[in-house]
Image (cartoon, helix red, strand yellow):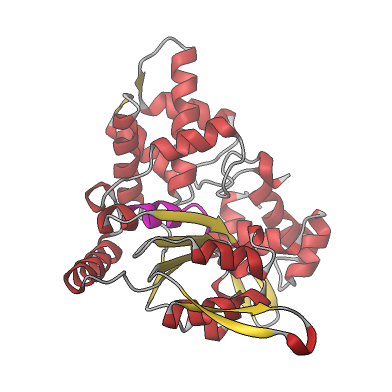
Amino acid sequence: MMNDRIINAESESDDELVLFDRSLRPKLFKDVIGRKREVDNLKILIDAAKMRNEPIDHVLLHGPPGLGKTSLAYVIANEANVPIYTTSGPAIERKADLAAILSNLEDKAILFIDEIHRLNRSLEEILYSAMEDSTIDIVIGKGPSARTLKLELNKFSLIGATTRVGMLSSPLRDRFGVDMHLDYYGYEDLASLIRQKAKILDIVIDEKASEEIAKRSRRTPRIAQRLLKRVRDYAQSNSSSNIDVNSVKETLNMLGIDNFGLDSLDKKILQVMVKNFKGGPVGINTIAASLSEDRDTIENVYEPFLLKEGFIMRTARGRVVTEKVYEILDL
């Protein structure tokens, strides 16, 4: 059910949408909108590393999905003028897989591991020595005759990205020199980003239209870009080369996305809490069971935005809806 949502912030597997997202990624710091504090800190990090002729320090990027963690990793590589190699936690299954990746990295290269929280704990021990000393221990042979060989690696930088930083072990998290949380975008920055992407796509969009898309994009760049594509399709199907606020409203209303960026699934969660449990408190497992959804999906995909926008609150006894919910649901 979640994967069918137009406002789902998770990465898409559809080739066309993946290429669309990649075509809009910023290349350099000057292209990055809405991340001034993060960019300023990263500029210092990269400049200092260049002066010392060293790889940059290891960087951990965390926050809700769709906020530009992968894009920022590529920008860092471009600004540092070093190659970047990408993988993900679930893709690395064996110690030999991780050892092969690390031993083939070029000097000062960046290894980007997405969903690093899903990396097997047994593999983390290999990363400890690799991150600290640029070495890994390889076990040769079995049984009493087995011996350990220390393998020297090229010096490299690890950039890890996660939507669930609490699942990282303390020893791994402590080895990142830069720990950077990416928060949801403000509406003005998101509207500016939409206009920037529209320009790349050769789309004429007025300011009010970009603000309307931003308002309904859950403060998330990936969703904003997806909605921009849908609005463009709608305008073109109506023989219009320009996007105005009316075409945005018509498109997003047709998609069932309201003025707050909520769709039918968000409202279903809120309605269940109000009608079945009198607004709460109610546990996340109970909510998930009532909706026939996975607990992790509710907690990591739907809930962060509902919390951020003040639709629900977390308490010691469970989740509680706020007065705002009764207003938007007309209850």
**Residue 51, located in which quarter of the rendered image?**
bottom left
Identify the residue at image location x=52%, y=46%: 261
**Percent position of residue 45, x then y:** 25, 70
Q: Residue furthest front?
A: 145
Residue 331 in the magenta stretch? The answer is: no
Up the image or down, 104 lies above or below 246; here it is below
Identify the residue at image location x=39%, y=13%: 240
Up the image or down, 147 lies above or below 224; here it is below
Identify the residue at image location x=58%, y=28%: 254
Up the image or down, 279 lies above or below 232; here it is below
**Percent position of residue 93, x then y:** 69, 64
Specify whether 264 is left or right of 230: right
Specify whether 1 is left or right of 181: right
Residue 322 appears in the rendering = no
Q: Residue furthest top?
A: 239
Specify whether 13 is left or right of 150: right
Residue 73 in the magenta stretch? The answer is: yes
Comparing 128 with 287, the one in front is: 128
Comparing 6 with 78, the one in front is: 78
Identify the residue at image location x=47%, y=84%: 174
**Percent position of residue 96, x then y:** 65, 67
Up the image or down, 49 lies above or below 216; here it is below
Q: Quadrant of the N terminus?
A: top right
Q: Residue furthest left?
A: 51
Q: Residue furthest bottom?
A: 144
Comparing 304 with 122, the one in front is: 122
**Percent position of residue 265, x then y:** 68, 47
Q: Which residues are magenta?
A: 64-75
